[in-house]
Amino acid sequence: MLLLRAAGCWRAAAPASAAAAAWLRGAAHRGSSVVCRNRAALPVDGAQQVTSFLGVAVRSLCTSSPHEHPEHGRLVYKGNLAKAVLGVRFFSYSTSIFNLFMMPYIMLKTGIGFESLFIQAAFYGLIGFFTFVTPVTLHVLTKGYVIRLYYKDEMDTYTAITYNAILAEKATVFHQKDVKIPDITKMFTTFYAKTKSMLVNPTLFPNPQDYNHLMGYDKSLYFNLEEEEKEADERK
C-alpha cells in the first residue's frame, strides 16, 4: 500500500515538475536574451569612454613636458652628484652640531678646562676644525656645483640651481654674454656667471650644442666665418 501511494504521489507531481522545468527554461532564455542585448550595448559606450579618456591623456601629454619649467625654461643639464653633495654637507653640519653640544660634557668629564694652556689650545683647535672649518670648506668647494641648468631660448638666459649655505636650492639667472671662461683650468670651476663660479660636467649635457652655446663656442665659430667672408670680399 505504501508503494502504491508513493507511486500515485510521484505521478501527480510529475506534471508540476515538468511545468516548473519548462518555466525555468523560458526564464533562462529570456534572461540570456536580455544579457545579450546588454552586452551588445556595452561596447559602444565603453569605446566612447575609452576614446575620450585617451584623447584627454594625449592632450595633457602634448601640453606639458617633464623637461619644461614654467619660469626657468627648458632643462638642458642635470648634475649626477647632487645627492652626494647634499649628503656630505648634511653629514658635516650634523657632526658640527653634535660637537657643539658634546663639548661642555667632554670638558666636564675629562677636566680639560683645568689643564695647561697648551692642552686647552690643542683641544679647542681640534674641535673647532671639525666644527667650523670643515663645513665652511665644503661650502666653498661645492657652492658652485650646478644641480640643474635651465635655458630660455627667446631671452637667451640661463637659470642655474645650486645649494646655498643652509642646503636650500638657490636660483641664479644670467645671460649668455655674462659667461666667462677662466684662463687657467680650475678644479671646481667650469665657467663664471658674472662673478660667480659654476661647475658643470660637459658630458652630462644631453645635447652637446647646448654646452657649446653656453660656453660661447658656437659664437667663436660664427665670428671666424664672418672674418673669412670679409677677407674674401676684400681680396675681390
Image (cartoon, rainbow, N blue to C red):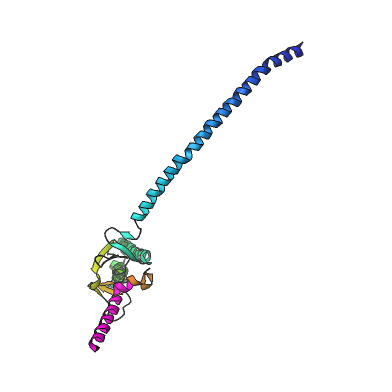
Residue 226 at what x, y percent from top left? 26, 81
Residue at image position (27%, 63%) is: 170
Nearest the eye: 178 or 132 = 178
Left or right of 49 on screen, residue 109? left
- Residue 218 seen in the current view: yes
Image quarter of residue 214:
bottom left
Q: Position of residue 163 (x, y in %)?
A: 29, 64
Residue 118 visible in the current orientation? no
In reply to whether residue 223 is colored magenta, the answer given is yes
Q: Which residues are magenta?
A: 211-236
In the rendered image, residue 188, in percent from the top left (x then y), is placed at 32, 74
Say which residue appears at 25% left-offset and 86% top-offset: 231
- Please tell me whether residue 8 is drawn above or below residue 145 in the rendered image: above
Q: Is residue 81 above or below residue 2?
A: below
Residue found at the very far top of the displayed protein: 1
Name the quadrant of the N terminus.
top right
Total count of labels: 0
Left or right placement of residue 40 versus residue 234 in this view? right
* Magenta region, main secondary structure: helix
Quarter in which the C terminus is drawn: bottom left
